[in-house]
Every structure is written in structure tokens, then in C-alpha cells.
Amino acid sequence: MNETGEQKAPRKKMKKWKKVLLIIIAVPLALFIALMAWAAYDESKMTPEEKAARDVSRAVVQSERESSIAASQSEAAVKESESQALAFAQAEADRARAEADKAQAEAERAKAEAEAAARTTTAIPTTTAPIIAANAAPATTIPATTTTTKPTTTTKAMTTTKTTTTTAPPRNISYEQLARNPYSYIGETVTFSGRVSTSGTDYDGKIYYSLDINGDHWSDIYIYSTDRNNRVLEGDWVTVTGTFLGLDEVFDKPSINEISRSIR
């Protein structure tokens, strides 16, 4: 109580966490102020020559730092340029190698096609002369007055001529041989059996279907057919005989031009 008899209000104590927080904030602030004051005091004691020497030293350090950064950037640029040049040279070498391989493959394919054409080309016998002679013989019995009015005998004889073509018997060539050395068997007559996995019409309007030869969905042969009525369906078991065409340009699989087939 005071002299007047009034009771004093009790002071509130600061909580402990507030004290800790105040210390954490006040101590770094006091250190910063002390350092600034020391720097200002030290600055005031320096002579103009000392200040000039300090500025020169700072400029030298800054210049060296900038030179180091520029040198690092220049070295990185040189390395990147060398890397790009090396990558370009490698790409050009790969492209030249690919073109050379392609040219060699085309040459081998052309050679194989020429050899296949030479093997499959056979002499086609003609029976035109004997047929004409046989059919023209009765014309000699027609009187001379009527021979000029019936020239149809010779015409009929010429229309009865027939041209026969022969197909080489199929060779026993495996799927692995066709897939590994396709250019060596172009033009050969082959026979395969398998389950039809796909069928349809390609972008050129050709009817095709594929046979799964070994049942593993990897050994497919693509067959091109002209029979638009008796088409094969997926799941049919087909035995086909045809002329080997080489690797298909779209599917990169062995392809055959169909000659005959049986479905069961």
C-alpha cells in the first residue's frame, strides 16, 4: 500500500519464452551495430593513401574474380563447340556408312533378282505352225471360186493357238533361310503352312494375309493374293505356294506372291 492507503497492482512477469525470443533477436542486432560502429571508426582513422590502397586492392580482387568467371565460361564454350563438332562428324560418318550399306544391299538385291530371273526364264514352245497347217488342210478342198469368200478358216486356226507357261517346283526353303538371306531366294517358288494371324487390304489396294509359321507370333510371312472372292480369314489354317518377293517394305517380313493355296 502507498501513503494514501491505495493498494499497488502487482507487476506482470514476462514469460520465459518471450525472454528467450528477445535475447535471440537482440544479440545479433547488437553485434551488427557493433560491427558497423567499428567499421565506421576504422574508416575514420584511415588516411587517404590507405583508402586508395584498399580501393585498388578491392578492384584487383574483383577484376581477378571476373577474369576467372570469363575464363571458365570461355572454356565451357570451347568444350561445347568441340562436342558439337564431334557429334556432327559422327552423325555424318553414320549417315555415309548407312548410305554405303544401303547401296550395297540394293546391288545385292539387283544381282539376286537378275539371277532369279535367269533361273526362272524358260523357252516357251509354240504350236502355231502345226495348228494352222492342220486346220488349213481342209481349205484346199474348197473350190477356187469360193476360197476368197471364206477367210475365216485361217482366222479360227490362229485363235486356237495357246501359250503355255511353266512354274518351277517349290523348293524346300525354311523360314529362317528366307529371313536371314532374303536376297538369295528372290524369285524362288516356296511352300509354307501356318495359321492366319492377320488379313486385309494395304494402301495400294492389294489383298494380303500373314501366316504364323512357327506359332510364336514372330515368324510371320506376308502373302499377297489376287483372289477377291475366296478370301482367307483370321484363324484359318492355310497351305500356300508362291513366288518369294523378298522382305516386305512395310512390315520388314518375308513376302510371297500367291500362286495357289488350300484352306482347312
Image (cartoon, grey):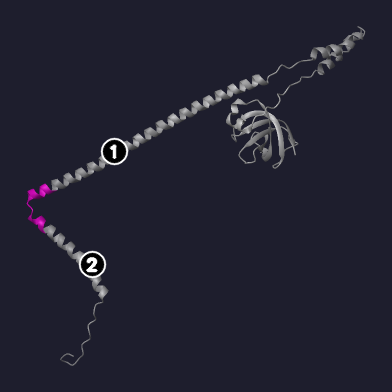
**For numbered disc 2, what is the local secondary structure?**
helix
Give the residue drawn at x 14%, y 48%: 55
Quarter of image, res 184? top right
Horizontal and vertical percent position of residue 71: 25, 39
What SS does tag 1 mark?
helix
* Image position of 235 (left or right of 19): right
109 sits to left or right of 170: left
Q: Quadrant of the N terminus?
A: bottom left
Which circle marks residue 217 in the picture? none
Taking the spot 81% from the left edge, 18% from the top edge, the residue there is 159
Residues in magenta, as a range: 41-54
Residue sitting nearer the eye, 51 or 202: 202
Which residue is pictured at 58% across the width and 23% down the height?
A: 110
Tell me how far mark 2 sits from mark 1, CA to CA. Answer: 46 Å
What's the mark number on residue 75?
A: 1
**Which residue carries the number 2 mark?**
25
Residue 116 or 67: which is nearer the viewer? 116
Instruction: Report x, y in % for residue 104.
Output: 52, 24
Tag count: 2
Identify the mark nearer the N-term, 2 or 1: 2
Dominant SS in magenta: helix
Establish if 248 lies above or below 154.
below
